[in-house]
Image: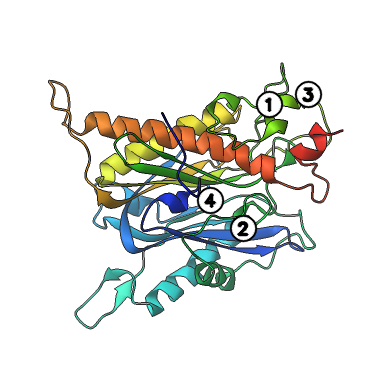
Amino acid sequence: MSQPGPNNCITDVAGLKVGSYTDRQALCGCTLVLCPSGATAGVDVRGAAPGTRETDLLDPVNLVEQAHAVSLSGGSVYGLACADGAVRWLSEQGIGFPLDDQGHVAPIVPGAVLYDLGRGAEFVPPVGPDWGRAACEAASEKPITLGCLGAGTGAVAGGMKGGLGAASEVLDSGITVGALVAVNSLGSLLNPATGLFWELGLELGHEFGPDAAQAKVLPPWPPQAEAAKNTTIGVVATDATLTKAQCKKMAQMAQDGLARAIRPAHTMFDGDTIFALATGGRPLPSSPGFFGPPEATAVSEIGRAAADCLSRAIIRAVLAAQSLGNWPAFRDLANR
C-alpha cells in the first residue's frame, strides 16, 4: 500500500536539501533544491509563457549529465537572478561541474520563475542573487513549511491564495519519489460542480485534513484569476538511478499530475515547468520482457508516483496558504 515518506516532502529523497528565502512585504521569495553530490536531471516545459534558465542543457543529447541545484522563484524575469546567487554559493563550496585539475567548478543551476509582480509593496520586488544565496544557506534535509513562503509567497491559484507545496511516496520497491511545487495557476484546483479538489482521492493518510473533504468552496469568489499572471513550477525527484532521458520522461509524466490537479493547465498564460532529479542511490528494478528495456516498467512506476506526488503537493500548497493581500485562502473560503 502506498505511503508517504517521513517528511512527506522532496527531502525524503536522499541527497537533496531544500531552502527558501521569503520577503513578506514584497510578497515574493525563492526556493532552492540543492543536490550537493549532483543529480541526473531532466525538464519538461509545457506552458506557453515560461521563464526559465539552463533548460536546454538538460536535453538528453547535451553534454552535462547532472545539476547541483534547481532554483524556483517569484519575481518573473527578475527572479532568474536568484540562480546566480546559488551558483556563487555552490562554487564557494567547491560544488559543480569540474573545469580543471585546480579545483575550479561550474555549478549547474537550472531554474524557473513565476509571475507575482505587482502583488507586494513595489511592482518589481527586490529579488536578486542575495535571495538565492540566503536560500542555499537555509537549506536542510528536514521537512519544509508549506504555504506562503519561498517561491510560493506571492502565488495565486485560480483566484485564491496559492503557495509552496510538497509530497512524497515510498514505492513497494523501496524507491522514494518526491515533489516540490509553487502553485500560481490560471486554472482552478476545485471542481466547480462539487466545490472539492479535483484530485482529492489521491490523499495518503490524512495529509489534507478534514477541511479538504468536508468544505465545499463553490465559485465564483472574488477576485477572479488573472490571465497572463500565472505559472506553476516545481521539481520531482527520486533516489533511483536514472539516465537523463529517463529523467525527462519522469518530468513529462509528472506534468500529468499538474494537469489533473489544476484545470485548465498549460495555457497560453502559464509557463508550467517541471524539473526532475535522480540522486542515484538505488538501482532500478528490472523486468525482462519483449518490449522495451528491462527498466521500462520501473521508470513508468516512478513517473506515475511523480505525477501523484505533484498533484498532492499542489493541493497541500493551497491548503496551507494564508489569506494575503486581496487573495483569500482556501481555509478562509471554506469557513465562510
Residue 51, labelled with which disc? 4
Q: Is residue 119 above or below residue 178?
A: below
Q: Quadrant of residue 283?
A: top left
Q: Nearer the viewer, mark 1 or mark 4?
A: 1
The quadrant of the picture occupied by the N terminus is top left
Name which of mark 2 and mark 4 comes first in the sequence. Answer: 4
**Residue 215 shown left or right of residue 265 in the figure:** right
User: Disc 2 to disc 3, how far (Cα)?
Assistant: 28 Å
Is 131 situated above or below 312? below
Q: Which residue is mark 2?
A: 150
- Separation of disc 2 and disc 4 at Cα? 17 Å
The mark found on residue 213 in the picture is 1
Q: CA distance from mark 3 to mark 1?
A: 13 Å
Q: Is residue 152 left or right of residue 47?
A: right
Q: Mark number for residue 277? A: none
Asked whether the viewer can see residue 269, the reply is no
Q: Position of residue 245 (x, y in %)?
A: 27, 41
Q: Quick one: SS at disc 2?
A: helix
Q: CA distance from mark 1 to mark 2?
A: 27 Å
Foreground tag (1 vs 2): 1
Q: Which residue is mark 3?
A: 218
Q: Amino acid at mark 1?
A: Ala
Residue under the point 26% across and 45% down: 242
Q: Residues within 10 Å of mark 4 (few under 14, many from 20)?
A: many
Mark 2 residue crowding within 10 angstroms, few (<14) / some (14–19) / many (20+):
many
Residue type, mark 3 in image? Leu
Name the kind of residue labelled 4 in the image. Answer: Gly
